[in-house]
Amino acid sequence: MQVSRDKLLEAYRSMKTIREFEERVAKEFATGDLPGFVHLYAGEEASAVGVCSHLVKSDQIISTHRGHGHCIAKGCEVGPMMLELFGRKGGLCGGKGGSMHVADLSQGMMGANAIVGGGPPLACGAAMTAKIKKTGGVAVTFTGDGGSNQGTTLESMNLASVMQLPVIFVFENNGFAESTAANWSVAGGDIVRRAEAFAMPGVQVDGTDFFAVHEAAGEAIDRARKGGGPSLIEVTLTRFYGHHQGDNQSYRTPDEVRNARESRCPLVNFRRRVTEASLLDAAELDAIDREILDQMDVATAAARAAPWPDAAEVLTDVYVTY
Amino acid sequence: MQVSRDKLLEAYRSMKTIREFEERVAKEFATGDLPGFVHLYAGEEASAVGVCSHLVKSDQIISTHRGHGHCIAKGCEVGPMMLELFGRKGGLCGGKGGSMHVADLSQGMMGANAIVGGGPPLACGAAMTAKIKKTGGVAVTFTGDGGSNQGTTLESMNLASVMQLPVIFVFENNGFAESTAANWSVAGGDIVRRAEAFAMPGVQVDGTDFFAVHEAAGEAIDRARKGGGPSLIEVTLTRFYGHHQGDNQSYRTPDEVRNARESRCPLVNFRRRVTEASLLDAAELDAIDREILDQMDVATAAARAAPWPDAAEVLTDVYVTY
Amino acid sequence: MARKLSMRQAINEAMHQEMERDESVIVMGEDIMGGLGVDWLEGDAWGGTQGTTKGLGPRFGRDRVIDTPISESAFIGAAIGASTTGMRAIVELMYVDFLGVCFDQIFNQAAKFRYMFGGKAECPVVVRTQIGGGFSAAAQHSQCLYPIFTHIPGLKCVIPSNAYDAKGLLIEAIRDNSPVIFFEHKKLYDAETEVPEESYTLPFGEAGILREGGDVTIVALARMAHMAMEAAETLAAEGIECEVIDPRTTSPMDEDTILESVENTGRLVVVDESYPRCSMGADISSMVAEKAFDSLKAPIRKVAPPHTPVPFSPPLEAAYLPDAARIADAVRAVARHGS
Amino acid sequence: MARKLSMRQAINEAMHQEMERDESVIVMGEDIMGGLGVDWLEGDAWGGTQGTTKGLGPRFGRDRVIDTPISESAFIGAAIGASTTGMRAIVELMYVDFLGVCFDQIFNQAAKFRYMFGGKAECPVVVRTQIGGGFSAAAQHSQCLYPIFTHIPGLKCVIPSNAYDAKGLLIEAIRDNSPVIFFEHKKLYDAETEVPEESYTLPFGEAGILREGGDVTIVALARMAHMAMEAAETLAAEGIECEVIDPRTTSPMDEDTILESVENTGRLVVVDESYPRCSMGADISSMVAEKAFDSLKAPIRKVAPPHTPVPFSPPLEAAYLPDAARIADAVRAVARHGS
Ligand SMILES: Cc1ncc(C[n+]2csc(CCOP(=O)(O)OP(=O)(O)O)c2C)c(N)n1
Ligand SMILES: Cc1ncc(C[n+]2csc(CCOP(=O)(O)OP(=O)(O)O)c2C)c(N)n1
Ligand SMILES: [Mg+2]
Ligand SMILES: [Mg+2]
């Protein structure tokens, strides 16, 4: 699949934004000023961006507890996201959701979701809407290797298949669910073998390779748009941080993490690939890098300076009528 | 697999008992004196008996809403079962359970279960007990084609596989879940393809052929006893009655049901097979038939004559302490 | 307004009229049309286990009347997802007893979207479900469980006691932009009342006063409203005049109507078919005990089943379920107290 | 008895002692040992998300300390199945908020076996789970939900407020032959009390009297018991003496201790962190309003969060959760009433 120069620049910007957002969140969390739980997506950027670069605003995605990357890839703004993570006024969810519930329905982002396996049924529903209204839209549900074992996920695959829904099941297999290895928890080791069981096309791709993800997603999404039903994509990748901030990662060797940052970094791979092939040049990428770092400074400073939500907000938004 | 004469007689008796129990229940239900819902197993006998003839008392099975056949195959007594279905004192569950909850833990029968997909997790637990205590025991969970799509069933298959539990997933594919055809609701049409997805052996057998079921179950159970982990068996069969008594079966042609009774009857097939091969003779089978009909007369008369449970029973058996 | 309909027919008519009026309304569930996968079949095979969805499929087609596999999390979640992205799904949880295989989608997803997302989501889904005992359907098919849903912020709960209310409340539910759980008592499907042909709505949070009376207030829902009326008849003959109130929706709850009545009678009996702990009965009685304390002339009595599962055998089930006789006893005790 | 333990340690010790004593006790859940599938790893990778199961794996081995995939229905169902066939499983539902993906196994299976099967089944399973707010864990990780479990006949519900109670109640739970749900408030794991080294049990259905006082009774569970004690201190300085009662188990519920106290004080405040409708607070207040009606000198007051999901942002969550100040206000209002 040919990818235009503009698309490449956009993809790089998106991946880099995710990376720097996560690095910044890690730093801010360490100060103790960031409330709640955070689960970082660093290392997995090519999955979110490789998939979402095929989507338009009206397509829907749904994410997991590890949701920042999917938000950014789907077009959520970094400033309101940072405000949300800090729990401040002006946050993407008014401070009511936090990291585990960032959402922006106006961007087709149906939310991070703190229930493992919570997303796939909902994505089937978004796909139903597209199918009934004949919009040509698709829905994508991102799920982890751990989440691939949840019954709600599995039955959603059957539902999507028998209803021929335009939904893509993207399984981000980062090797672990908390501290439990996917090579144990996923029977047979591979998630992709479940595609066949539910009679849908499935493919396993290297999640450090943006182009591989992009191509696989393109095919699946195109098929779905044309009425060809659901697909499964298993993306193998590595998370650079622990399960959540605070995880001591005793189940991985320090080398493992270090090596991953060197050898399994989607950004490094992307940069090497596009510069070696002279598709983009290093200087323009460097410029983007600088821009993004500035953007993070601005977003963080703004979030830290922002007021808290009013206490009266506790009582609003529960029903449509109050 | 060779089956001894005694085993064959026992199998026939068990299948015929199931059949006549169900025919009698159908008749009694039509009088209006049988309370609640009943789901009849007639036509599916070779599945329950083909599997359970490999089991000993300490092995555990768990069933569905369509549970009478599994009960009888696992050794529950017909008299107390009939009392239970009539809701009388002396019923297998003291009249508290009824058709959808007949159970006899002393026979390794963990109960009919009125929640579709309720059984598989529980069977995994019984298998865990056997595994931890190293008894060589196994657990069998019977599930329908409809139940094969329930997330609880699917995730139980993964659990059993990664834990290598001695549990057999028997899927009784009778073509329908209520009025919904399995060829629609099961993605890809076959349940057996899911075995591969969860990395366990799987086989599809003709459920009108006792010998086929018996052989497949023998292999799976033997493997499980030896520590070889779970297996899946899809048994294709036909239910002779509607989903429940009262179902008008508008989704099947009258011919379909009539033909099934002729061409897809496990009892007819069994009799033909064993008499043609001179393994058993027709006269001894006829004798068994008469005995069983008598037994049903006795059980029904006893149930009709039995007293109701005392109203005070409402308050007992909820906790172990009251 | 002479036409009579059963509650089953009234519910069916409500869905027909709303599907006609609004293209975004869809209906989903197991066997709601039935026969899916049977090529030669035309029309409804079942039309739902209770026939409540009959005729919708033939009229509106399988695109909008959607049969599902048995996977409640997936298809109720899908109804919720669809309703968050532009549809208005009416989805059947065949029996409320099955909530345990799909409750997450209802209570953590549908109920919380709007709040968690800072008011930026709407989820106009209706979950229709059967409740209640009386058919010897035993422990896993006879529960009420509406207290569990009423407990959850973000869900509205509707529990009609008759055909007229059912139609108006269901249409209201379909048009409401919050998730609504609509509980149908299986013993009431055949009960008839007059029902207007035209479409109409009844507001949530407005109790019905089924009978006026100045001696004792009885609050009762669904089938228990009928039991309460029966008791009230008996009691009237004894000279005790009961005011019978049917809250109709438990979330929102019409506290005012109940409180006004108790301010007048000073005596309250709450009848509830749900399990007795953390129940609807406890909820209402506690609310009144707090807000009408000074009016109460006698302790509030709750009439409820014992704290056990629902038994199968008919005489056991009869002993288990509240009935008119037990309600009348409670009213007599309350009426006598302190007088 | 000078040794102090945190509630986390007390819970851990209880499991250690019971596993030592009884071979049939097993522990199951996600990451309770952790690191499964990592060949080179020895010992605990996590020991549970809260460290409550640390050391059990190294001591008793993976045969009895069983990590699971993320499939709560399957593994909680398996714990229930194992406990019905000879084991005594302690299984972790990591957060109570996840009940929606597995509740069927708990409320329709474990809770009902004994009854449905006419007394012929026992299911000595313990489900341990985290509850409560206070960590900005937001709407899907901060709920209490114990009213839902308390509603269900056949389940026993234990909600300890301190390390000493937690140890004794957990050992009792493990030895009990009925299914027990054991709720651990995540804000209390670090709270220390003196805890005897030897094994001991505390009976279910016996409330603890945390403080004696003759003016107002406060009933409060888990973290709210601490808030109530804080409020009681403040109020004592104002001359209002509170009796603070911690029910410790909500099913069975020690009604007598509460009723006796209210007969003495005539005034009651119930504090409950769960959602306010069909809640524990409503349950207790309704029980007292019925059974101690003649003793009540003032309306019972409930202190509870508003009827909304739990918000994320710290100041919002603080405004949401009941605290000592709100409890003290309620007590003052009750104390003043009619005097
Ligand atoms: C139903 C449910 N069970 C358990 C959890 C706790 N939990 C949160 S994330 C997680 C691990 C998820 O692993 P995976 O799906 O591989 O996603 P990853 O964290 O690797 O992105 C667990 C067990 C939860 N949030 N929801
Ligand atoms: C969780 C749940 N959903 C739905 C039902 C209602 N129901 C009872 S039996 C049945 C069909 C089951 O079909 P299948 O599994 O094929 O078994 P069969 O009846 O053919 O033996 C349904 C939908 C139920 N009891 N439990
Ligand atoms: Mg993972
Ligand atoms: Mg079937």
Image (tube, coloured by chain):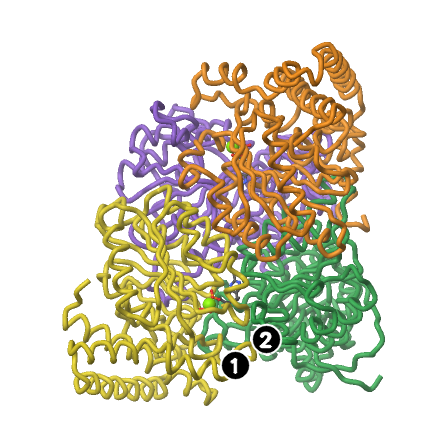
Chain colours: A orange, B yellow, C green, D purple
Q: CA distance from mark 2 to mark 1?
A: 10 Å
Callout 2 environment at 10 Å: few (<14), some (14 to 19), or many (20+)?
A: few
Q: Is residue C215 visible?
A: no
Q: Which mark is residue A253?
A: none
Could you say where residue B97 lies in the image, as x and y percent from the top left?
41, 70
Chain of the residue on which disc 1 is drawn? B
Q: Measured along the vertical axis of the image, is residue D178 above or below residue D12?
A: below
- Quadrant of the drawing holding the C terminus of chain B: bottom left
Q: Nearer the viewer, residue C215 or A232?
A: A232
Tell me, yes or no, whether the two marked residues, 2 and 1, touch with CB atoms within 8 Å.
yes
For the N terminus of chain B, the quadrant is: bottom left
The image quadrant that residue D136 belongs to is top right
- Mark 1: is the Cβ under 8 angstroms from ligand 4? no
Residue C209 in percent (x, y) is at 78, 72
For mark 2, give the secondary structure: loop
Vertical side of B146 occupied by B307: above or below: below
Task: Quadrant for residue A72, please give it.
Answer: top right
- Disc on res. C40: 2
Q: Which mark is residue B253?
A: 1
The chain letter under disc 2 is: C
Q: Measuring from the top left, give residue B315's x and y in whole percent.
A: 43, 67
Q: Mark 2 or 1, which is nearer the eye?
A: 2
| Residue at 20 percent of width and 80 percent of height | B275
Where residue C232 sits: x, y (%)? 69, 80
The amino acid type of the residue labelled 2 equals Trp
Q: Identify the amino acid type marked 1.
A: Thr
Compare residues A298 and D54 and report the one nearer the observer. Answer: A298
